[in-house]
Amino acid sequence: MPTFRILTVPAATLFWAFMTAGAAFPARAETPPSRLDAVRTFADRVLEHGRDTFREEPTPLFVDGLNVDTLEPVRWVHRGDAWIPSNLASQQNLLRTLVGLSELTGQPRYREAAAATVEHHVEHLQMDCGLFQWGGHRFIDLASGRPRGEGNLPHELKFNLPFYEFLWEVDPDATREYIKALWNAHVLDWGKLDMNRHGSYGRSMGDLWDHEFQHPEPFFEGRALTFINCGSDLIYAGAILYRLTGDEGALRWSKRLAEQYVRARHPETGLGVYQYSKPIRRREPPAEGPLEGRLTWSSYGDRAENQFGAEFGDVAREGWMLRSPDAIYGHNALMQLQLAELLSDEGGEFLTWTVNGLKAWARYGYDAESHTVRPMWADGTDLTGHVVGRTGYYGPEGRVFEARPASALLFWSYALGYRLSGEEDLWETVRAMARGHGLGDMGTSPGQDVDVDLEADTSDPMALFAVLELHRAAEHPDYLALAARLGENIVRRRFHHGFFLPTERHIHANFNAVEPLALLALEAVARGEPDAVPRYNGGRGFFHGPHDSRGRTTDHAVIWNARRGE
């Protein structure tokens, strides 16, 4: 883990000095720029055009992204008001990129800009309860300087996995206070770890780690929805707080929460789970007919049971519905594997639990021949081709569940799982997934009988992280050559207008893009300094709320996926 230096000169002062000097954007050359030049151009454009200058007093806050043609900030439109989102929870990969770029270039202005935005948020926007104003339902509107979002603007993180090490270096007291407030706001019943994705900004601090834990049975009825995307953020925050401060209570409760998901796995297959509780049924759903609108609310109880219980029996539970493996075996697995490595002996449970889960899913959920993932129940029932018989939370009547290609995120989690565990079963899955992504043969074992495809066409940054993981397991030159090829593909296919975009047709540049961080990781490995760049942990950003053009939707749907001609 690199040490992130915070300079004694105020970061905001140095940043605004840089801003007055400007940063010219070079014309696009016929030959793609080097990977480091591409990242530097991206960062310079962000610093020049992506800061808060929308009111009388400018601040060092970032906008979430820009229109690549006009360089205007992206806007969220609600009831005719055009908000300019600045969501620090959706800028954590940007912070990692800026810090990593300063490490590799020796130019401090990128780190200073990152520090300045964190300093401003802590000094002016952190709530008295300790929570930051960010996340899935709340951001700062730079047009007004006020928090905006959905409903009562609850606190929500779902696989955001913030850059806590850097937040700590900027302000350790504020970071410690935030992590404790995060747990305090989201855990409703500590005895059962009844935990909810929505946290209240008005809750005063309780007993926290001093609560008594009752070790409840899986799938107890609770007031909340114990989704693994929110639970992962709590697990990660508590474990990192222990890493930073030695707070044993934080680690103890992080492990208890992680084990809740393990104990709820299916007893025969070891598969699952997305949640470890069932919502209390406060209203009785109709026995027949479509379950639409309010009938899909959790106040009617377990949505999978309501929609599929008559057909599949007891296995029909929300926690045991495995439609997409990326949440459990991608984001959560990567986070816990990285914690296992970071915490060494103290992280042994994270490694064991996660590797066992990966082995189970490889056995039941992944088809190596077709490189596809099956929709399924956690008892192993394959739902591929199943026609939904009753409209409900999981789709309308007549929808057909389909197998899908395995993501590069899964390839990366299996590569990391193998490197840390040495489990041969995981290696065979790594080989199959590499072939499925068109990367060739990673070998009979790491570094042995390697036959990679150096003409591979993929530009997915997750595939690059996976190959770098294999290079770390065995420093075979072909792994590094393949990683370099993937880096070239990212620059060639995803670097447009000075930003990183999924395609050239995309209209808006998301500053939280993972591509520049992946390129910096490759550059660091090529220099023999793999720890010089902050490690990406699978975290992401999002906002969910009402938009005038789409109704209740996400920023990914209405902003980041917008393309020309659509």
Image (cartoon, helix red, strand yellow):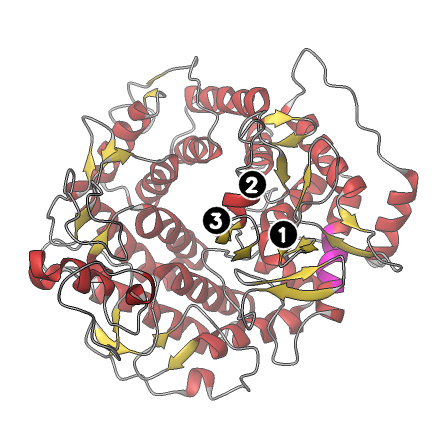
Amino acid type, residue under disc 3 in the picture: Asn
- Contact, mark 2 vs mark 3 (Cβ under 8 Å): no
Name the mark on residue 560. Answer: 2
Q: Main secondary structure of the magenta part?
A: helix
The boundaries of the magenta stretch are: 114-120
Residues 145 and 525: in front is 145
The local secondary structure at tag 3 comes to: loop
CA gap between label 1 and label 2 equals 12 Å
Where does residue 476 sit, x and y in percent of width and height? Answer: 41, 24
Amino acid type, residue under disc 2 in the picture: Trp
Q: Is residue 116 magenta?
A: yes
Residues 485 and 299: in front is 299
The local secondary structure at tag 1 comes to: strand
The local secondary structure at tag 2 comes to: helix
Where does residue 566 sit, x and y in percent of width and height? Answer: 53, 30
Q: Which residue is mark 3?
A: 537
Where does residue 551 sit, x and y in percent of width and height? Answer: 50, 54
Q: Which residue is mark 1?
A: 76
Q: Looking at the image, is mark 1 or mark 3 earlier in the sequence?
A: 1
Q: Is residue 537 left or right of residue 50?
A: left
Residue at image location 71% in from the left, 69% down from the top: 125
Closer mark to the observer between disc 1 and disc 2: 1
Closer mark to the observer between disc 1 and disc 3: 1
Amino acid type, residue under disc 1 in the picture: Trp
Where does residue 43 sit, x and y in percent of width and height? Answer: 72, 38
Q: Looking at the image, is mark 1 or mark 2 earlier in the sequence?
A: 1
- Contact, mark 1 vs mark 3 (Cβ under 8 Å): no
Q: Is residue 281 left or right of residue 335?
A: left
Q: Is residue 171 magenta?
A: no
- Contact, mark 1 vs mark 2 (Cβ under 8 Å): no
